[in-house]
Amino acid sequence: MREVQSITHDEVQVWVSELAGLQVGDVDFERQRIHVLRTVSEIRDYFVVGTPKTGETRTVIFPSLLRPCLEGACKGRQSSDLLFPDRRTGSYLRRAQGRYRGDWFCRAKHAVLDEDAAASMTVHDLRHTCASLLVHVCRECQGCAAADGP
């Protein structure tokens, strides 16, 4: 599950707070889209559910390589269930031991990569990989620029 979260965050350009708020019903497999409708932030051990940063919901395309992973995450679950619940509580994911060494991205890459590859990979590396794939696939650099962000 953590691997799916890592890939989704980096390849689809969904913020961590948006990822935490995703529900099963937010994934549209027919159109290959994820609807970003809410964010979840952890503030002083409490969860705060809000709207995305811009105050508006948005829809993002997910790459086909994510389809099997997302289908597995959604299988047998209700549309209102969290897409990525905390395994222990079933609630929203909590930030684990600070931003870096103990965070879910570090744990996910160490779970699927060898030690050298995991140590050298950053979120920024994956963002550039996503941008390269978008340019290659869509050939419309103007549309890709909007997905890549600032």
Image (spheres, grey):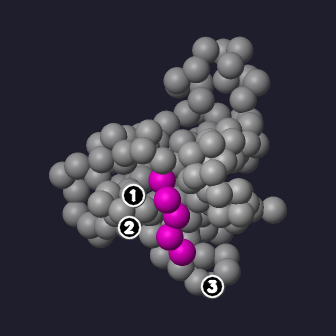
User: Is any atom of residue 95 visible in this view?
Assistant: no
- Say above or below: 37 vs 97: below
Query: Residue, x 54% and y 75% (percent of image)?
Result: 58
Question: Which of the two labelled residues, at mark 2 and mark 3, occupies the earlier sequence position?
Answer: 2
Q: How crowded is mark 2: few (under 14 residues within 10 Å), some or many (20 or more)?
A: many
Residue placed at 58% from the left, 20% from the top? 113
Which residue type carries mark 1? Gln
On whether residue 19 falls in the magenta region, the answer is: no
Q: Real-space Cα distance between discs 1 and 3?
A: 23 Å
Q: Which residue lies furthest to the front in this view?
A: 139
- Amino acid carrying label 2: it is Asp
* Element under disc 3: loop
Query: Which quadrant holds the C terminus?
Result: bottom right
Q: Kindly identify which residue carries mark 2.
A: 26
Between the C-alphas of marks 2 and 3, the distance is 17 Å
Residue 2 lies left or right of residue 27; in this view the side is: right
**Magenta region, mostly helix, strand or loop?**
strand
Task: Tell me the quadrant of the picture where the N terminus can be found.
Answer: top left
* Mark 1 or mark 3, earlier in chain: 1
SS class of the residue under badge 1? loop
Q: Residue at x 59, y 25 (%)?
A: 110
Label 2 SS: helix
Residue 92 in view, yes or no: yes
What is the crowding at mark 1: few (fewer than 14 residues within 10 Å), some, or many (at least 20)? some
Which marked residue is nearer to the observer: mark 2 or mark 1?
1
Q: What stretch is highlighted in magenta?
A: 58-62
Q: Which residue is drawn at 43% across and 62% down?
A: 33
Q: Is residue 149 left or right of residue 57?
A: right
Report which residue position mark 3 lands on. Answer: 55
The amino acid type of the residue labelled 3 equals Gly
Measuring from the top left, give residue 49's x and y in whole percent. 53, 76
The residue tagged 1 is 32
